Image (cartoon, grey):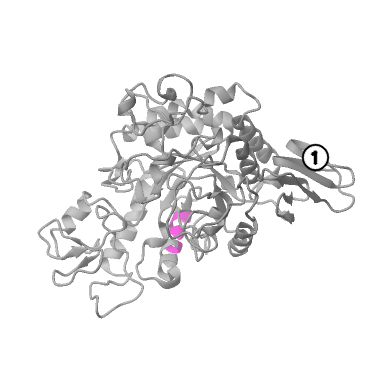
Amino acid sequence: MTSSPPAWLADAVLYQIYPQSFADSDGDGIGDFAGIEQKLDHLAWLGITTVWINPCFTSPFHDAGYDVADFLTVAPRYGTNDDLAALVDSAGRRGIRVLLDLVAGHTSDRHPWFTASAGDPGDHRYIWAPEDLRPPGYQPSPGSRPGWYRPNFFPSQPALNFGYARADPGEPWRLPVDAEGPRANRQALRDIMDHWLALGLAGFRVDMAASLVKDDPGHVETVKLWTELRGWLDGAHPQAVLLSEWGDPGTAVPAGFHGDFFLQFGGDDDGLPLRSLWNNDAGTVNEEWAPARPYFGAEGAGTPQTFLTAWRAATEAIGDAGFAVLPSSNHDFSRLACGPRTAEQLPTAFVFQLTWPTLPAIHYGDEIGMRYLPGLPDHEGSVLGPRYNRAGSRTPMQWDSSSNAGFSTAPADRLYLPLDPDPDRPTVAAQRADEKSLLHLVRRLIALRKAAPELGASGGVEVLYAGYPLVYVRGGRYIVVVNPGRTPATATLPAGVRCTAVEASGVSITHSGDIGAAGFGYGVFEIG
């Protein structure tokens, strides 16, 4: 049995920082820890409580840092371990916790563990097939050891061996989960987490958490692995949290995670619940996804039911053990401002995200409506398919109207990725100066969420109308109305309900309970 989540997590507002692209303090064109530290006041002003930093460890960066060569040392391009410690300390003084990204399932092919394994046939930290049999996708040994290794994702990312759930006589290299190599890797996860938590980090977001044990129907053995690690964590670091990149909160949280993200993949429905909200087929597109209209689309042709059904199932499975996390986007998925979705459509998305009973996670720049930038070249493994280029969601943060939008003093051709070339691109400075901006709306919604427990992750919800508009009651105290379509929409409240607008634009409720919602209208109303 695991303990309840730390109390602080229930009120968390998460913010994802892609460190390469957030703020560059030394003018080399790549963001760094000192740059993040310089921008902490923006996050504190916004109301952010918890920051998740994408992988920042030593790496050859064939996959933007998800190919780790040293789990205990940060990459020099971001600074030093002491610089990270200073960032964590500065964030803590502002009431902001910092999570790191833990890549649990693989390393870089330049990690000392792998170079040693490639020269030692008796080492089983990785998955090796014999020289006379090459399974599909396996890569040739780069060392004196004969045979082939199994990668995760790119060839430069050899899979750590956490064992197989099922034996196969045709694949005698399959080791059980309690073999020496898998046991060593489970201990390594503890050692890595223990190292960083001792330095003041608040926890981890775990990359591809469902992928560790191979050939594992129902993730039975993978669940056991994470449940074991959670038991250790509860005893050694009871205030630390684990969030997973699993994409199936109803499985991941009972497995031992404090929270799991709805994602563009994962679970039996391959991420359809999140995509049914945001994905408009104009940014990162997997060719295997069936075309569908998102609920947050101007055409008004989607439905919230896909997400609502998945959310209900997840929350029933989770109970009080943790939380589902709803992101605005992420480093692997299109931003909200993508393709035909315009700035006037973004407020409804944030009103929903920040008043629904999930933990909200804001991808850096989404709070000002930074757009997904199409057509960028492949950079550090950003391209995953003919229409799936992750670089468009990883462009430099747009701070102000100065050179390079205030991200860096480097020449434009040395920036980590190109800036949005639109002269009207949104910036933090411009929106700070405009109280009618998206940035101010997001700030007010976060403040309202913090002030009203009924609007938080643990408050109750009752959906009154699941169409255009979407109408729901939070905690018996607030009514939320969003109309993501451009066409005006109507609904009716139960008789006798009286309410007052707290945050509204284009939505009105008459004394008789008739709701009128203009196109892209939204409203949060207090009952009584």
- Inspect the magenta stretch and tell me whether residue 479 lies in it: no
Image quadrant in which you'd find residue 510: top right
Confirm whether the magenta stretch covers residue 233. Answer: yes
Above-or-below relation of 69 to 368: below
Near-viewer residue (408 or 51):
408
Residue that mark 1 sits on: 508
Question: What amino acid does circle 1 point to?
Answer: Ser
Label 1 SS = strand
**Magenta portion: prevailing SS class:** helix
Q: Residue at x 28, y 69 (%)?
A: 179
Q: Is residue 111 visible?
A: yes
Q: As displayed, is residue 110 above or below residue 22? A: below
Q: Position of residue 244 (x, y in %)?
A: 46, 54
Q: Is residue 490 left or right of residue 175?
A: right
Q: Is residue 209 left or right of residue 7?
A: left
Residue 269 coordinates in the image, percent (x, y): 51, 64
Please state the horizontal and vertical placement of residue 39, each as a whole percent of the image.
47, 27
Residue 526: x, y in percent? 79, 41
x 53%, y 49%: residue: 280
Position of 154 relative to 250 (above/below): above
Quadrant holding the C terminus: top right
- Name the residue: 23% across, 76% down: 172
Q: Quadrant of residue 507?
A: top right
The span shown in magenta is 227-235
Of 326 and 243, which appears nearest the observer? 326
Instruction: Give the residue furthest to the left.
Output: 144
